[in-house]
Amino acid sequence: MIAALDNYDSSNLETTALISLLGFVAAIQISIAAAGILLAVTVVLWIALLGSKREWPTAPPFFGALLIYAAITLTSALFSLDPISSFSDSREILLFLVVPLVYRLARGRHAQTVATIVVSVGAASAVFGIVQYGILEYDNLGQRPSGSMGHYMTYSGLLVLVIGLATARALFDTRERTWSVLVLPALIAALAVTLTRSNWVGAGAAIGILFLLKDIRLLVVVPVLAALVLVLAPPQITARAYSAFDLQDPTVRDRFAMARAGVKIIKDYPLTGVGPDMVQEVYPDYRDANAVQKENPHLHNVPLQIAAERGLPALTIWIGFLGLVARDLIKRLRADKHHALSAAGLAAVVGMLAGGLFEYNFGDSEFLMLFLVLITLPHCEET
């Protein structure tokens, strides 16, 4: 297939690859199956394009840290308690190809096109979630709005990233401000009705950092908005918000119990962890006496999960990766270049970290793909 594409006119190949990339970006918030297929197609087109133009793959500086993280992940899988299962789970590192794909294909003005697609699809998804809540009665913890995603956590995590992007464009991009301002209420409302406290925290942190970047005085607005939401929100939402401060709440108790179990696992497997996808296998052996759930697929905390699964070296590299991303984005903001996308990338990092203290969002494929898109786009505008 790649050989056949080599004979295809390079300009047409470039256009086709871009269209495929745009389809992939749109599909992330619609269907993981469609996104996976379009990602594979885009990879093939990207390879063919590089071959036809005799180019080497390129990527932003932070991609090197991701490659090291991928290598450590494979090492962890090799020494896993069940290497076959761990290697199978490690396929997620293939998603890191999103970075060089976006970097090569979304150059210049196309970066803004990608951002517009993300916001627009997110807005449509938000409306769908609101309909699920208001009409289909997805209004309780047993059945929450999830859009077209398979799980409400994935849905709400994606909304955090889109809210960060839309807010950044509203604050820093006069050309794209109107559409972003129009869709933000729907995005925030959709996130609210998912009843996902971790992603409420993530969105609040993302908006907070954007207000800080724009004007520190805007931070005063954050608690005012939060109080207003609590006053006007339906009782399910206010009760869910207050439960975050209730130490007797079962989910709060279980989060603390999982953290204690995670620390024990890390102490026993500090270098390579128990292996990708193995925490759920060993969790019963480390389960805290105060734990609520007998089993858990992960530790609901990104740093703890990475360290327990892949070891402390993996966690160190992951932190370094985020440090490189943040450093580059801050440099761009200080240089007065491409404020909106750089601010959106920084909001994505902050939102992921804040929400990731209570949920393993970095291990969610859809979330990870969109996150990688958003932190790569600022590097594309100047290429």
Image (spheres, rainbow, N blue to C red):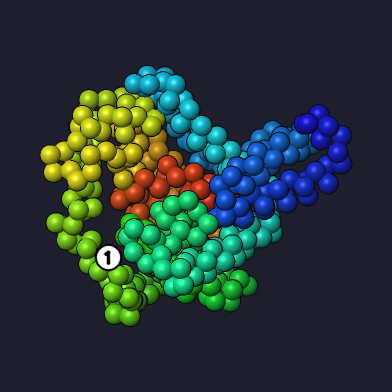
Which quadrant is the N terminus positioned in?
top right
Q: Where is residue 39 in the image (x, y as percent from the top left)?
A: 63, 42
Q: Position of residue 297 (x, y in %)?
A: 33, 39
Assign a secondary structure to mark 1. Answer: helix
Residue 288 occupies quadrant: top left
Q: Position of residue 103 (x, y in %)?
A: 63, 46
Residue at the spot 80% in from the left edge and 43% down from the top edge: 13
Q: Looking at the picture, does residue 296 appear above or below residue 329?
A: above
Residue at numbered disc 1? 240
Q: Looking at the picture, does residue 129 appear above or below residue 277?
A: below
Residue at the spot 59% in from the left edge and 73% down from the top edge: 179
Q: Position of residue 146 (x, y in %)?
A: 46, 58
Of 85 and 94, nearer the camera is: 85
Residue 234 occupies quadrant: bottom left
Residue at the spot 46% in from the left edge and 31% down from the top edge: 89
Residue 239 occupies quadrant: bottom left
Q: Looking at the picture, does residue 44 appear above or below residue 84?
A: below
Number of numbered markers: 1
Residue at the spot 48% in from the left edge and 27% down from the top edge: 88
The amino acid marked with disc number 1 is Arg
Q: Looking at the picture, does residue 336 appear above or below residue 310?
A: below
Say left or right for 169 vs 327: right
Of 380 and 75, nearer the camera is: 75
Residue 310 appears in view: no
Residue 51 appears in view: yes
Of 316 and 8, nearer the camera is: 8
Direction front: furthest residue: 136
Rate crowding at label 1 as few (under 14), some (14 to 19) or many (20 or more) other CA atoms within 10 Å. some
